Amino acid sequence: MPAPGRHETAVSFLSRLAWMNGRPIADLRTETGIQPRSIDLGEEPAIRFMATLCGMGVGPLARWSPRRRPDRSWQLHGQNLGCEGVERTFFRFCPACVAADLAAGGRANPFMRAEWTVAALRTCREHGLLLASASPDRDFFVPYDFARTILPMTSDLPRLTEEAGRPSTSPLETYLVDRLLTGTKKGSWLDDLSFHAAADLSEVFGAVALHGKKVRVTNLSAAERVNAGAAGHAVLAEGRAGISRFLLDLIRETRDGKGVWGPQLAIGRINDFLDAHRDDPGYAPAVDYVREVVMDEVPLDPDVEVLGRPVGVRRVWNLRSLAREVGTTVPLLKKILIRNRYMSAKSEFRASRSTFDTEKVRAVVATLDDELLTLPGVMKRTGLTRRHIEAIVSAGGFVSITDAGKVHNAQHRFGARNVDGTMEVLLGGEAVDRIPSGMATIVDARHAAICTFSEVLKLVLDGRLSRVCNLRGAEGLDAVLVPQAEVLALTKREKPAGLTRIEVQRRTGLTQKPVQKLFEHRIFHLRIARNPVKRSEEVVATEESVESFMRDYITLHALAKHHGIHFLRMQAIMTVARIGPMFDPVEFSATFYPRGKAERLDVASVDPDKVVLRQRTRREVAERLKAAAAATAKSADEIQREVAREERAVATTDETEEPARQWKRLGRSRRIKGAIGRKRVPSRRWTAERMG
């Protein structure tokens, strides 16, 4: 009797038993009572009968023989191999293993390993060779005869060993062999799948990754399927994160493609494979998760089925379906989504391929599910002027769906419900026949508070005023009455830190020209501030620098008043005392002296004979006036630009930062006469040049 080999199947042992007795397998049924058909199906009673007849235990043979289950699937060592997971019409073998068996025990020693019968295992774990195939002769209801098929091939074993491919070690086959032989789980996401599902799904994912979405896995060679299994195992072993990333890459490739964007176009052969096995419980985790990813990323209608289940509730929109849903055009919808920052203006635009998450655009969908009004339509509906409508938009009352407020020459679109609701708030105040005491129209209130029309409207819309009235007989916003004192209090702004030129004049007692020159020569510390009334930027001087200037300098007229003498005599005394002016009197239109020396000067100690008062001649007066006229001051805009440039230079501390851009205007476009009359010189436009 042959000794059973390690992991030998019952069919292999039966074949060796028949060969050693010189009988075909079919004859053993009538001569010994052994049931070859039952042994082929892995039925334990038939295997036990054969083992008892041979005087051996049934355990190893029954454990390593594939057994058919009632649902026609196969089970081996506790692993579900599926309906097609066992090779039955032919067998595969490792020529190196068979040669080793022959060398160890003679012609009756080669036996079939259980792992060779598993269709998903294509290499020998011991030698790393691709398994060779053999096609034995078969009779009906009789298993193939391994021994009688393999022994005539013994002379070809060296050639088969040499010709067998030796692919790289596959992590998938390593995982499957360990799972089959030991039955232990490795903590991988593949453990949630049945054995055959983990094997087949890995090959499909890997084939798509290596050969594209239209690949036919059955057309791949054994070596290619081994490589595909390794690639697919790398994806599936990461679990949901790896599957999601892989599927998203596939879906992203179809954004620029053609055809109806559905599950088959999105993930290709993966969809076909899972759709064919969606009823197999072993694939359930993969089917459920892949279905969720596809429904979350591909714009599908609610009645479209994904892996046997309808979408139900739409999760993703594309531009075309969203425009159809809200009843607008695709170009208008695109503008709305771009200006509401739901899509980039630079992105590739295709109505059927631009997708949006339903949760993100739900607010836009709810807004668009209404009658859309243009600005002329709002004027006709409300009777308001264009200026008043723009003010309400700025106040946040009318919401422009297209967000066209800052876009040149763009058109607004307003929802009818939003327009009607805003007008109810504005005109829904207490009806009065005349203006009550303390109340004023919006125009009068804004002038009194020195604020904008929109600010008063915002107070009304936000409900921050204690009382709002509606004047009968007035039209539009002229009928809205607001409490003037409350508007003044609510719109009052804090005074910015710093003194304007007018405030410096009031603080120092100087006139306009001296203050303008002091600003121009940076005698004060200047900075940029925003005017609370005009809302524009302007140059201001810090209060500390103004106070420091007043402590350090005094004008000629103030000094004369301090000493109680005429300013001309004071000027002559300062000349005799050799205390000269600090700044050019002609350029600054004022004479400044150092305050400390000038105020401590003892006027009585100055020799009166040296103090000479001389009246200027007409010529000297004319020359002085001419010099004063020539000393023109810089404009306020020029000073503001210089101060802003200085502030930016101080704020820029990174030496590696790109240099600023200087905008330069090129020459005017003109035609060139002659043979090149159609050519033009560079047109008049703005161009940027780097500052070195």
Image (tube, rainbow, N blue to C red):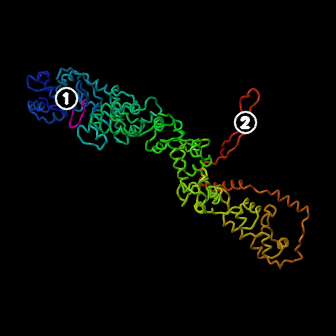
Q: Is residue 229 left or right of residue 26?
A: right
Q: Nearer the viewer, residue 376 or 96?
A: 376
**Image quarter in which the N terminus is found:** top left
Residue 181 or 42: which is nearer the viewer? 42
Residue topped by disc 2: 669
Q: Label 1 is placed on what type of residue?
A: Phe
- Classed neighbour count for the residue bearing mark 1: other residues with Cα under 10 Å, few (<14), some (14–19), many (≥20): many
Residue at x 58%, y 43% (from the top left corner): 380
Q: Tell me where residue 615 appears, x and y as whole percent.
A: 90, 68
Q: In this view, does 333 lie above or below 465?
A: above
Q: Say which quarter of the image contains residue 531.
A: bottom right
Would residue 493 be seen by someone viewing this image from the given angle? Answer: no
Q: Which amino acid does label 2 sit on?
A: Ser
Q: Is residue 504 above or below residue 33?
A: below
C-alpha gap between disc 1 and disc 2: 92 Å
Q: In this view, does 582 lie to the left or right of 197?
A: right
630 part of magenta stretch: no
Picture disc at residue 111: 1
- Residue 156 x, y percent position in the rendering: 26, 22
Q: What stretch is highlighted in magenta?
A: 74-83
Q: Does the magenta stretch include residue 80?
A: yes
Q: Magenta stretch: dominant SS?
A: strand
Q: How crowded is mark 2: few (under 14 residues within 10 Å), some or many (20 or more)?
A: few
- In front: mark 1 or mark 2? 2
Residue at x 62% of width, y 46% of height: 386
Closer to us: 237 or 20 = 237
Element at label 2? loop
